[in-house]
Amino acid sequence: MPNLTPRQKLWVDQDGKIVMSDYRVRLLALVAETGSLARAASAMKLSYRRAWGKIKEIEANLGVPLVQSEVGGPGGGHTVLTPEAEAIVLAYLRFQSRMAEDLRAIFNEEFASILPRTPV
Amino acid sequence: MPNLTPRQKLWVDQDGKIVMSDYRVRLLALVAETGSLARAASAMKLSYRRAWGKIKEIEANLGVPLVQSEVGGPGGGHTVLTPEAEAIVLAYLRFQSRMAEDLRAIFNEEFASILPRTPV
């Protein structure tokens, strides 16, 4: 049994609705990085409309504002995350990273006797 | 943001094919518990044919025999796990249990400052 690889998918529910996931948090992180929902959408190969709809859906489910838009000025509009969204993105990315580390470590420990030579 | 609940889905790939998952390992664990593929299939609301096909698919992907059937005798046939399958089931159940503990602990730690009152 060579090449066994543990996998995980993570998400966060609120009252049965998905409010955070790798995909959703990546969209928010890209808004923070690029300062633009249009550029974040483009980086994820989403339409602007679809990206905007996804953010509004998460805001509605969470009950928390996630983005602030600043209109006009040289270079056009600008979108930034709210402080609440910044805190959520950072917490989720740490959660995701630690879970990925644990996935490999725990899998290797539990399957060591079965797969003595399989590094993961 | 009350009631946030972290979720995860776990599985194990080999060369891009799923060879273990909560569902697949539950089927094997039920064979071990009931001594019968028919009863294991019934407990999971699967047809016998479908349960058998799933086990043969995992065996083909892993390259390891998972079940042994003993035909006849009073009470009819009997299906048991091979020693390899028993080791896989036990390792996966420990992996799954430890990952579930970590999911809650890590989520609570990383989201504590955002959700000071949310026990998960």
Image (tube, coloured by chain):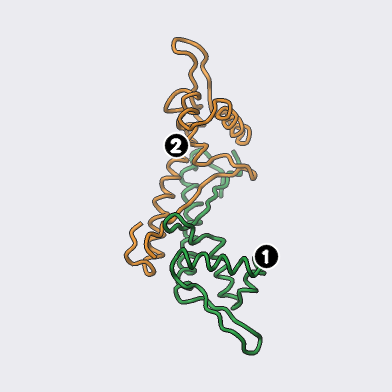
Chain colours: A green, B orange
Q: Position of residue B61 (x, y in %)?
A: 62, 36
Co-location on one chain, circles 2 and 1: no
Q: Which residue is mark 2?
A: B90
A93 left or right of A51 in image:
left
**At x 46% / y 68%, what residue is drawn?**
A88
Residue A25's mark? none
Residue, disc 1: A45
The relative height of residue B118 versus residue B82 in the rendered view (above or below) is below
- Mark 2 lies on a secondary structure that is helix
User: Which residue corresponds to the image point at 53% horizontal and 26% vertical from the top-left?
Assistant: B67
- Kindly indicate the quadrant of the structure image that contains residue A74: bottom right
Q: Nearer the viewer, residue A112 or A66?
A: A66
Q: Position of residue B76 (x, y in %)?
A: 48, 13
Q: Is residue A6 above or below residue A89?
A: above
- Decide which of B43, A115 is in the foreground and name it: B43
Q: Looking at the rendering, in which quadrant would you find the N terminus of chain A?
A: top right
Instruction: Tell me the subunit letter for badge 2.
Output: B
Is residue A101 placed above or below B16 in the rendered structure?
Answer: below
Indicate the chain on which mark 1 is placed: A
Q: Of the residues tagged 2 and 1, which is closer to the observer? A: 1
x 48%, y 69%: residue = A90
Q: Position of residue B77 (x, y in %)?
A: 49, 16
- Which of the pair A53/A105 is nearer the observer? A53
| Vertical comparison of A84 with A76: above or below | above
Badge 1 amino acid: Lys
What is the three-letter code of the residue carrying label 2?
Leu
Q: Residue furthest top?
A: B74
- Looking at this view, name the residue that lies furthest to the bottom: A74
